[in-house]
Amino acid sequence: MERKNFIKLTLGGLAVASLQPLYSWTKNLKEDDQKLPVLFIGHGSPMNGIEDNEFSRTWTKFGKEIPKPKAVLVISAHWLTNGTHITAMDNPKTIHDFGGFPQELFNVQYPAKGDPILAKTTSELITSTNVGLDHDWGLDHGTWTVVRHMYPNADIPVLQLSIDYNKPAQYHYDLAKQLASLRKKGVLIIGSGNMVHNLGMIAWDKMQEPEYGYDWAIEMNSIFKDKIANGDHNALINFEKLNAAAKLAIPTPDHYFPLLYNIALQDDNDEIQFFNDKPVAGSLTMTSVKIG
């Protein structure tokens, strides 16, 4: 992936200085009194981004209930990279990374600002690898379809952290732990994917049937929930060893890895709340988790 403007970012002093009035809160990232929760959201179909349904209504509900964050950081299943990168532009574009949907969906623009200073600060929190400051990506549908329901006024900066697809599950879990301090500094961290996600086995004839799931999908979803509720992170990191159905639930780990970023941030005193806990089209689940 191109990394245009890298030199501009490394020179950075004047650019950062000019942004200080707008992003002064991020300069020192002072801790707030209240630690924000962490969300893993099953985002499902891109159509959830424009539909008023039970899933999107729950996202709207959480946007009203959670203390208003200073920024949102999303780990989306749809930004897979070599290496780890974070969006660092002032105005991230709305990415329509899908096909075959109504024009209404392609017309959506979610004009949330970015936050270059927070991006740089976050990159410096991560010491296990070099984090690139990205100016080419934006907000893909794993992010904006959810966040636009939570914060429809687009008045909160939104950043994305990429998933290094060459790394194993343990790498992502360990990297995520380095983001823990952001929870007390006004940053809402969201993992956006799906616990059970097998597009190759979708029951197209059951698309309109509510809560239809294959037996193996329901079984694995239940196992995942049990492991999350009991804090069995090791089992979730080594998901391939859970049982044979895990290979059906997670044929590729892109939509599962965001969950690891969330459970890594779970504290001993955090409450666990599951929501949107339903299968869709046989081989997907919308099950989502609020931690804290």
Image (cartoon, rainbow, N blue to C red):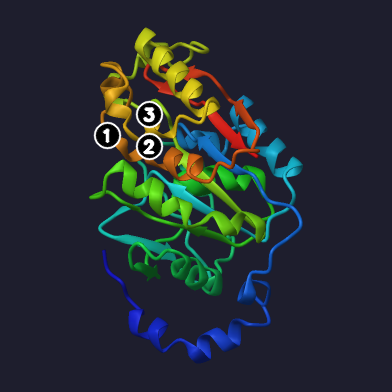
The CA span between labels 1 and 2 is: 8 Å
Q: Position of residue 149 (x, y in %)?
A: 63, 42
- Left or right, residue 145 beside residue 54: left
The CA span between labels 3 and 2 is: 17 Å
Let me know if residue 95 appears in the view.
yes
Instruction: Name the residue carrying label 2.
Output: 255
Q: Position of residue 96 (x, y in %)?
A: 42, 49
The picture quadrant where one finds residue 241 is top left
Quadrant containing the C terminus in the rendered view: top right
Residue at left offset 47%, top offset 62%: 93
- Left or right, residue 82 beside residue 46: left
Whether residues under marks 1 and 2 lie with C-beta atoms below 8 angstroms apart, the answer is: yes
Instruction: Name the residue carrying label 1.
Output: 252
Residue at left offset 27%, top offset 27%: 240
Mark 3 vs mark 1: which is more N-terminal? 3
The picture quadrant where one finds residue 31 is bottom right
The CA span between labels 3 and 1 is: 17 Å
Q: Which amino acid type is shown beneath numbered disc 3?
A: Ala
